[in-house]
Image (cartoon, rainbow, N blue to C red):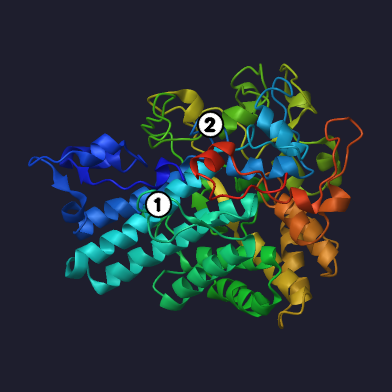
Amino acid sequence: MNKIMKKYTYLTTGLVASALLLSGCSDSFLEVSSPTQETINTYFTTDEHIQEAVVAAYDPLHWTDWAMGQYNPICIMSDIMADDLWVGGADKNDNQYWHLMMNYEALPTNCMTGIWTDAYSGVKRCNDVLTYLEWAGENVTEKNRAYYTAQAIALRVFYYNWLWKFWGNIPYFDVNLEPPYLAEQLTADQVYEKIIADLEGVIAMNVLPMKEQSVNYGRVTQAMVYMLYAEIVMYQNDESRYGKALQYMQEIISSQQYDLVDDYTTIFKEAGEWSRESIFEVNYKDDNAARSWDNPLFAGGTVLPRLISPSGWADGTDGHDNGWGFAPIRKETFDRYSANDARRDATCYDAAAAGSYNPRYQDTGFFLEKYVGHTGDNKDQIADADLNYNNNLRIYRFSETLLNAAELIARGAGAGDAKEYLNRVRKRAGLVTEKEPSIDNIIEERHLEFVGEGKRYWDLIRTGKAASVLVPDEYGFRTNTWSENKKYLPIPQSEIDAAAGTLTQNNY
């Protein structure tokens, strides 16, 4: 494995904050010893300093949009392999590996690597927290120890979920590695058993609140863990755990701490962040945001709105900003919605009708309204405006809780009013005609509800629809058909090389 697995031996007190932003160091640094330095096994022994490590474990959640030399916004990287978005950009060589992914021809030497590194950085930091808690002993109360442990394990599963779904057969470790930093590669099914057991352990601890107070928005909650559990179980098609997943969805519903907001169009605005519908978001801010091209891991905003907005747009026209023209929405996606469906215009921004811009490759005129650049959303940043939009990334919403519950009931997991759950979502969208809760109807409702939110591709795979839906298009952009041997991306060749023969490459 690469240096993301390496541990620090020494930290100077004044460098703790910056050290927490890094994931590796040189061998020479590991050998340095100085009486002016504090060892990490003495520094990370207090509650205050372990809290720093917990915060650091959340940091990689923010990096996928731009870090490690790649644009890998987590909500887009799966959707470009589905059927709602094109890749866009200047041409098929612009972010070329995106285009290869879209056509199911990614190569180990030209593939997505950023999320791999981001995720393993997160895993390493979560393991750090658990190690530091051992060092701290009685310096941390049992209540706080349990709270920090639950967060670290839940976050570790969240990071492994990225790796498991994109790559399947991955190196797995739950204690940070020693030289030569090589982890055992598990099969996708073995990884599943590891991460689901971890989640069941966190749930059994029962120390996370169902919903956090505003000061802690962005931390994992019991509801977030329940949603992660349902996502993983349903993707694995593990019928033996469907009943538990349904129970957890119904616990969220019956808690009455979450609900649908009345107006779908408000969900993705700044004022809609952490609404009563939101179960988990990744926080981005523009207030004094210092993220820059020189320091992309600094706290601040996101580049996603700039990445996916229309190119050559005059900032402020119709309240929108200029962008780089990636991930245009397909015309077929717009046409899938009924004209009276509130989700259509809240999802598909008709830039062609609203103003003048420079059409780029695969342009349709439609862009993802949920995350495009809105004028003023980066006005308070202090570094690079491109990287500091304040759009929080929505991960789990209450509408997904309802649709999960409806689907699980339809699959025979237990009792409940699947029709009511399904049609609550439809009614909020402005659709008065009720539908029966068949699997196909529920999956179609998920399709309309979550365009651009990173759900569709995985839904097509887990329901067995991918091979019939993800086929060559009439435009000649996608020329290959998805097949089972394309389920996992190739492991980056740099990782294969670094693993000295201990990693087996996926089929590709």
Under circle 1, the secondary element is helix
Left-right relation of 203 to 334: left
**Residue 124, which numbered label?**
1
Is residue 29 shown above or below 260? above
Q: Residue at x 78, y 74 (%)?
A: 410
Is any atom of residue 395 visible in this view? no
Are there few (<14), some (14-19), or many (20+) residues within 10 Å of tag 1?
A: many
Q: Residue at x 41, y 76 (%)?
A: 205
The percent position of residue 294, horizontal first and vertical second, equals 40, 24
Q: Residue at x 36, y 54 (%)?
A: 215
The percent position of residue 198, horizontal first and vertical second, equals 48, 69
Left-right relation of 381 to 239: left
Nearer-the-camera pick, 421 or 474:
474
Left-right relation of 273 to 49: right
Please name the residue that numbered disc 2 is placed on.
303
For residue 438, which quarter of the picture? bottom right
For residue 250, which quarter of the picture? bottom right
- How much space separates mark 2 and mark 1, taking CA atoms? 25 Å
Q: Residue at x 72, y 83 (%)?
A: 415
N-term-proximal mark, 2 vs 1: 1
Nearer-the-camera pick, 320 or 27:
27
